[in-house]
């Protein structure tokens, strides 16, 4: 897909924030020249908290949405990496993904074409670890855990397929493992583009 070589979200820690009330409402704009996104800079209405990853198509940022008062993951896709057809497909896919509501699919909150420089997707921020890193650090998953992870992946794909959406880049780095407040492991499938 048009964003398939984007570096996936790679982060850990809690996505909850107790500083929501103190985050800035506006900030200086960020240039899209590939330079680092400084903390406190803005991308559209979102305030950058940190850069999570970078790839040939753009970068992924952890950001704060002052309008809805929550953290989000922003995927900036550089417009020079997209032709008009790819841009239209990316926006259409983001709109389709935004209609999905499933515990194993990363929620898409917004898509915006920012000036002539980029397309920005605002998505659910998932605090967790990609499956490829888990396997690298811990080795093969225990059979019961592998079954649980696989079932959750298949449920996310079934939900997407029921809406006519096909994941064109399913791989361990696009599968995040995270935990609920009661320590239940949850799979979140990313990057359906």
Image (cartoon, rainbow, N blue to C red):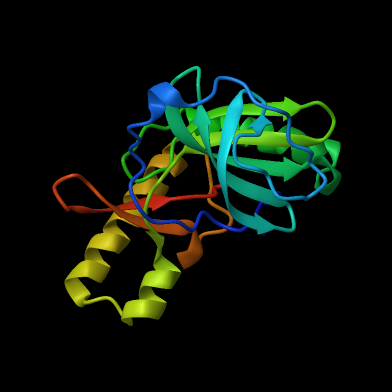
Compared with residue 163, is residue 104 higher up or lower down, i.e. above or below? below
Residue 123 percent across, percent down from the top left: 50, 36
Q: Residue at x 23, y 61 (%)?
A: 148
Compared with residue 125, is residue 23 higher up or lower down, i.e. above or below? above
Residue 189 percent across, percent down from the top left: 43, 51
Q: Is residue 12 visible?
A: yes
Quarter of the figure with residue 48: top right
Q: Residue at x 81, y 44 (%)?
A: 82
Left-right relation of 52 to 106: right
Q: Nearer the viewer, residue 27 or 12?
A: 27
Residue 23 percent across, percent down from the top left: 48, 26
Q: Residue at x 35, y 35 (%)?
A: 17
Q: Nearer the viewer, residue 178 or 99?
A: 178
Q: Residue furthest left?
A: 182
Q: Residue at x 68, y 38 (%)?
A: 90
Left-right relation of 75 to 137: right
Compared with residue 152, is residue 72 higher up or lower down, i.e. above or below? above
């Amino acid at each position: 897909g048009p964003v398939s070589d984007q570096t996936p979200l790679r982060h850990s820690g809690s996505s909850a924030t107790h500083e929501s009330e103190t985050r800035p409402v506006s900030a200086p704009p960020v240039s899209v020249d590939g330079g680092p996104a400084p903390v406190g800079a803005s991308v559209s209405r979102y305030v950058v908290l940190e850069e999570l990853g970078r790839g040939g198509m753009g970068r992924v940022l952890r950001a704060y949405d002052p309008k809805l008062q929550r953290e989000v993951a922003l995927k900036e896709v550089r417009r020079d990496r997209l032709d008009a057809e790819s841009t239209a497909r990316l926006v259409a896919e983001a709109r389709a993904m935004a209609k999905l509501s499933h515990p194993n699919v990363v929620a898409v909150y917004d898509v915006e074409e920012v000036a002539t420089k980029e397309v920005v997707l605002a998505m659910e921020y998932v605090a967790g670890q990609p499956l490829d890193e888990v396997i690298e650090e811990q080795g093969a998953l225990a059979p019961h855990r592998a079954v649980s992870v696989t079932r959750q992946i298949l449920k996310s794909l079934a939900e997407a397929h029921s809406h006519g959406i096909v994941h064109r880049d399913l791989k361990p780095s696009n599968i995040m493992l995270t935990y609920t407040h009661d320590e239940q492991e949850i799979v979140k499938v990313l990057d359906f583009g």
